[in-house]
Image: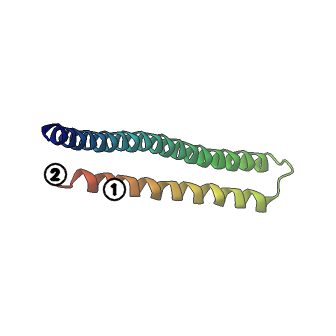
Amino acid sequence: MSNSVDTQSLMLQMRSLAAEAASQSQSVQKVEKGAQSAENFSDLLSQSVNAVATEQNKSSAMKTAFEKGEDVDLTEVMVQAQKASLSFQAMTQVRNKLVEAYKDIKNMPI
């Protein structure tokens, strides 16, 4: 009889250890996924900034070409200038929201 009790307690211990190990592996996976999403977010942010810079460079090049008298349509120049302006304003708003979210998190009570 004492043998069966020891076996049962041993089985309970093994199950609890298995459950603990499973929860730890899940938390490690969550941390790894969080790191990947952080990398993806930084990549996304970097790509967005580069896209805005590209739009502004296109606008500047078209303005310069128009001023030099090259064969560039004024409406295309104005549309490109508006695209650059709009993309910059959108990026500025995203930055403002990120700063606001950071301040909210920073001011949270622990």
Circle 1: residue type = Ala
Residue 96: percent from the left, percent from the top?
40, 56
Q: Along the polypeptide, which appears first: circle 1 or circle 2?
A: 1
Q: Residue furthest left?
A: 2
**Dot 2: what SS?**
loop
- Is 73 placed above or below 33 here? below
Q: Please report contact status of discs 1 and 2: CB closer than 8 Å, yes or no.
A: no
Indicate which disc residue 42 carries. none
Q: Is residue 27 left or right of residue 41?
A: left
Q: Is residue 12 left or right of residue 81?
A: left
User: Are there few (<14), some (14-19), or many (20+) residues within 10 Å of tag 2?
Assistant: few
Tell me how many marks there are.
2
What sort of colour scheme is used for the picture?
Answer: rainbow
Front tag of 1 and 2: 2
Residue that label 1 marks:
101
Residue 47, quarter of the rendered image? top right
Residue at 71 percent across and 60 percent down: it is 78
User: Are there few (<14), some (14-19), or many (20+) residues within 10 Å of tag 1?
Assistant: few
- Is 64 placed above or below 96 here? above
Q: Is residue 24 left or right of residue 78?
A: left
**Dot 1: what SS?**
helix
Residue that label 2 marks:
110
Residue 76: percent from the left, percent from the top?
77, 59
Q: Is residue 96 left or right of residue 15?
A: right
Residue at 53 percent across and 41 percent down: it is 43
**In terms of depth relative to the viewer, which is nearer, 3 or 86?**
3
Q: CA distance from mark 1 to mark 2?
A: 16 Å
Q: Quadrant of the N terminus?
A: top left
**In terms of depth relative to the viewer, which is nearer, 103 or 44?**
44
Residue 37: percent from the left, percent from the top?
46, 45
Q: Residue furthest right?
A: 71
Circle 2: residue type = Ile
